[in-house]
Image (spheres, helix red, strand yellow):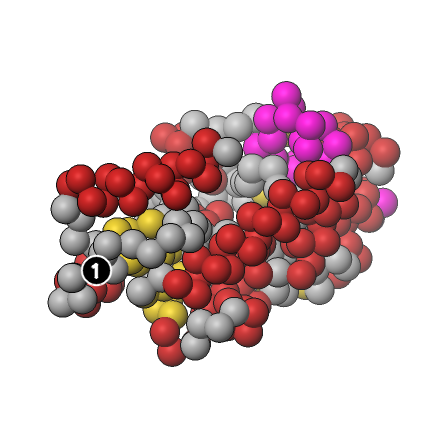
Amino acid sequence: MGVIRWYERGLPAAIKEYGVDVLFSQTNYLPRRRLLCPSLLLIQHAGHFSSSYDQLMREFLCSPAACFFWALKRRWVHRSAEQATLLTVQTAALADAISEQTARPRGAIEVIPHGPGLAHQRKEVKNGPRPELFRIGYVSKWGVQKNFSTLFAAAALLRTQNYQFKLVVTLDESLRGNQRILETARVLGVADLIENKGEVAPECVEDLFDTLDIVVFPSLCESFGMPNVEAMARGLPLIVAATKENIEVTRGAALDFPPMDAAALAARIGTLIDNDAERTWRAELSLEIGGQYSWRQAAEQTIRALDSLMDLRP
């Protein structure tokens, strides 16, 4: 209720009190009431426009009351997307989904990709001897869409084929969702293959990527998928679930697999472990594509979007 009070009373009052020219909301929401200034809305949660994410959320929430409030939030985001003066998202895939599910025309949605997350762009791929024990990373916080179960099932298959590896994850074990994920690993018999770093501080993310040999990203729904861009910026070979947004963001640099197919994911990982030339080529391709993402470019596009709204001030 505090969130609703802020958007419906506090934010409109602040706009009036401070004579705001343009509102830039990065929270997915706008007040339902009419504002005194034009608005730029950044939608950062693709789950509100994904049927698969919606189903996963309803299964996770369990209680009818929780599902009801989730549905209300989803409708609120849809309404906000429709009423914003200008709407921006990070991928064309999300822009298409919003246009299909709301009254917002596709041409009235601007795609502004973000920069390389918390990682800096490397100048060259790191070199070194072939690892005896491959470190395969999935750098991500918890989310119902993150699809750890497919990764763990793939790890179980790779173990039967005598591959030597560790799965490096970043899960806060105090959270209920993460406890479920790690229990799945125990059930599948791969708990001993997991090296859990816990939730990693922002300043340590880049260093963590640099300890990895391969990065996997099996997530089923993303607005952008920042770890993909971080992995590419650090010149790491990458394997992603073949969702529209993952394919769009990686731009051909990554190997992909059908999202829920553990055998296909295991085969892709096996390819990168077995084939040194493929692994090196994919790393170099990652570095090339990662260099195309820029925070400066994202900032300049955002400033142009804000400038375009200045003439619409009352």
Q: Nearer the viewer, residue 10 or 85?
A: 10
- Residue 304 visible within the image: no
Horizontal side of 243 relative to 79 (left or right) equals: right
Q: Which amino acid lies under the numbered mark 1 shown in the image of this protein? A: Leu
Where is residue 89, by image quadrant? bottom left
- Please say whether residue 145 is visible from this viewpoint: yes
Measuring 77% from the left and 54% from the top, which residue is drawn there? 262
Q: Magenta stretch containing residue 178, yes or no?
A: yes
Q: Quadrant of residue 104?
A: bottom left
* Foreground pick, 28 / 240: 28
Residue 290 among those drawn in magenta: no
Q: Which residues are magenta?
A: 160-181
Q: Is residue 112 above or below residue 157?
A: below
> Vertically, is 142 above or below 41?
above
Q: Quadrant of residue 61?
A: top right
Q: List the residue tagged with mark 1.
A: 306
Look at the picture and state if 231 lies above or below 80: above
Give coordinates of residue 70: x percent, y percent.
62, 46
Residue at (55% x, 45% y) in the render? 213
Q: Nearer the viewer, residue 198 or 104?
A: 104
Q: In the rendered image, which quarter contains the C terminus? A: bottom left
Q: Residue at x 24, y 54 (%)?
A: 36
Q: Residue at x 17, y 48 (%)?
A: 20
